[in-house]
Structures are given as C-alpha cells and as structure tokens.
C-alpha cells in the first residue's frame, strides 16, 4: 500500500489544522506477466482519507476508478538453425521460432521470402510447416503444412512460441557450396504499424489493441547451402592378343576400365554405369568387376549384370570425393 500524508486546512472559522491520510491501493495485478499485465485486466483503485477535527475522527472512501488494460501487439522471430541447412535432391529445412511478446492472445501471419540481397542463388519455397508435436524436428506427415492463403500461426498466448519450418529447394543453376538466405516475417493479424498505432475495440476483452515497439511485425534470416555432386566418367582400354602383345587382331581381348569420379560436397543417388558391347566383339563371360571385386553376370544379389548386350553396374548413392571403378572385357571377333 502506498500512503501519501497531505496537510489540509479546514475552512475559515475553524481553529487549528487537521492531518488527512490518503491511502492508495497499489495497482499491481496477480496476473503480472513477462510481457506486462495481461490485456483485458481490470485495474481497480480506491483511496481513503482519515481525518481529525476537534475531538472527532473519521474516514471517507473515494469512488472506484477502473482501468482496462489494452492489448499490446508485439512479436519476436528467431532463427533456430545454428548452421546453414543443406539442400541437395531433398529440400533444406530452415527452423525458426515465432513468439507472441505482447500481452494478449494473438495469431501471426507468416511470409517466407527467399530473395535476400547478397544471395548466391534464390531458393524456391516448397512449403511452410508448423511443428505440431513441438519436438524441433521436421516430421513429414506429422507436422502441419500450411496452405497458400492461410500462412499463419495458431492463436498464441502471451509469451508462447511456435516453431516454424520453411522447406526450400534449389533452383536450376545452383552450384555446390553456394549459400543463400531466407527471411521469415511474422505480423500480428490484428494489425501492425508505427508503435503507438491503435485499433479501437480490437484488443482482448473489447479494449483497444496498440502496436508495440516491434511494430507488431518481426523477421529473421536463416541460411542454406547447396550440397551437390558432379561426376566424370573416364574410359580406357588395354589389349592382349593371342601372341602376348597388344595388337587389336581377331581373338585379342580388350579390357575396358570405367572410372566414375564423384566430386563436390553432396552425393549422387541411383548412380549406374552402363556400357554396350561394341560391334565386332563378344562379351567375355565372368569378366565384370567393381573395384576389383568380381561380379556375376546374372541379375542376382550383386550390383552388376553382363551379357551380349552390355553391362550395367548399380553403384547406388555415391558421395563426393569417391571414385568407383568398373572393368569388363570383350574379345575381337
């Protein structure tokens, strides 16, 4: 209780003076919050005066003054991705948090912009997703994909946050190790603008909604990096003729070596090395090898097949910095 002691002098004709004590109830609410008093809270205040006149003492109580707290519109956006997210054949997943830093429940419109000054490339926004189970990890089929035209958070209580995933794909022409940024902006659905802008009757409990220092709109940048791979395929041949020399005569065996060199920070998926049997030659059964390991010619559990029409070796996923070698032989007819 804050108490103010103020001397008051009675009207003319009364000898002496009296002391009047004004007692003011401090306007603190039980719902005190990190964002301030909650919107719609009624702050009620009365004062009392105690006095003495002659041999008489008394007390009077003032009228009650009630103030309804307006809603303050504020928001904070932060990037939770601590390092650039990789994008390759799969989209990069950028992680943000959106926090209602106002004092009333509010939903926020979301906008993801891949065109940021300084980008080496501008990605393509595939989708904006809410972290439905709040585990901080993008779970396809579980988390809520927002549809175009309704990109917004749910209604957030004061100081509550939601995690937002932005999925970004690489454009044609992006090269390995190039970086880019995407800006996520969150804006209060009630309104935004210059701090102090008021929206009459739009606040919680029928009060006004007032734009706070954040302008009721905030944004943050998250980065992605292209993780791509390239391949060079180099073919060479050695010849062994029936005489023990290297003459390409009928009956000579030509051994082909195919070196598949993958470079870059990413990987290639579903890589196959395929070659046909040249006209005028016949495939040598059992000559097919991968990295010096023999492969059967049949379509069975190993990676290759070989026969009269050619060879096919499935290398699968190959990371950058890897070279795979395929060898097979034919005999000149």
Image (cartoon, helix red, strand yellow):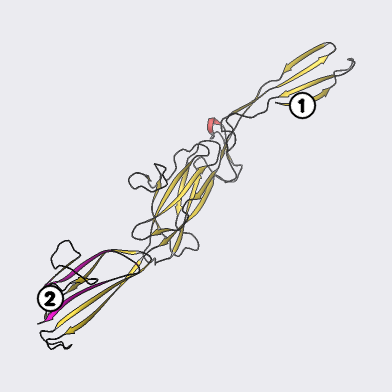
* For marks 2 and 1 on the same chain, the one whose residue lies earlier in the sequence: 1
Q: On the image, which quarter does residue 74 sit in? A: top right
Residue 278 in view of the camera: no
Q: CA distance from mark 2 to mark 1?
A: 108 Å
Q: Residue at x 20, y 78 (%)?
A: 256
**Residue 18 drawn in magenta:** no
Q: Which residue is mark 2?
A: 284
Q: Is residue 75 left or right of residue 267?
A: right
**Residue 310 drawn in magenta:** yes
The answer to which of 102 and 199 lies nearer the viewer is 102
Q: On the image, which quarter does residue 174 sit in? A: bottom left
Q: Is residue 96 left or right of residue 126?
A: right
* x and y percentages locating residue 13 in the rendered image: 90, 15
Task: Decide: few, some or many residues near mark 2? Use Cα within 10 Å; few <14, some 14-19, many ≥20.
Answer: some
* x and y percentages locating residue 154 in the rendered image: 44, 39
**Mark 2 falls on what kind of element?**
loop
């Amino acid at each position: 209780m804050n108490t103010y002691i103020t001397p008051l002098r009675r009207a003319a004709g009364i000898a002496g003076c009296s002391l009047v004590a004004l007692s003011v109830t401090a306007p603190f609410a039980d719902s005190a919050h990190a964002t301030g008093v909650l919107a719609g809270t009624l702050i009620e205040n009365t004062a009392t005066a105690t006095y003495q006149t002659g041999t008489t003492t008394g007390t009077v109580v003032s009228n009650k003054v009630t103030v309804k707290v307006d809603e303050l519109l504020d928001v904070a956006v932060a990037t939770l991705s601590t390092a650039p997210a990789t994008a390759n054949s799969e989209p990069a997943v950028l992680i943000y948090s959106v926090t209602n830093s106002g004092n009333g429940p509010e939903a926020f419109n979301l906008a993801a912009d891949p065109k940021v000054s300084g980008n080496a490339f501008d990605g393509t926004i595939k989708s904006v997703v809410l972290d439905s189970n709040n585990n901080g990890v993008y779970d396809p089929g579980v988390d809520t994909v927002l549809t175009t035209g309704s990109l917004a958070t749910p209604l957030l209580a004061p100081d509550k946050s939601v995690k937002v995933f932005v999925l970004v794909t690489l454009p044609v022409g992006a090269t390995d190790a190039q970086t880019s940024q995407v800006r996520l902006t969150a804006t209060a659905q009630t309104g935004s603008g210059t701090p102090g802008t008021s929206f009459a009757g739009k606040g919680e409990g029928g009060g006004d909604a007032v734009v706070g220092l954040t302008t009721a709109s905030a944004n943050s940048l998250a980065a992605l990096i292209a993780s791509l791979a390239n391949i060079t395929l180099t073919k060479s041949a050695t010849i062994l003729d029936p005489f023990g020399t290297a003459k390409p005569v009928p009956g000579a065996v030509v051994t082909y070596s195919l070196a598949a060199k993958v470079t870059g920070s990413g990987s290639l998926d579903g890589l196959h090395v395929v070659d046909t049997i040249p006209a005028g030659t016949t495939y040598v059964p059992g000559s097919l090898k991968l990295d010096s390991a023999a492969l059967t010619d049949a379509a069975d559990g190993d990676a290759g097949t070989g026969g009269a029409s050619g060879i096919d070796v499935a290398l699968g996923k190959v990371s950058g910095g890897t070279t795979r070698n395929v060898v097979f032989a034919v005999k000149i007819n």
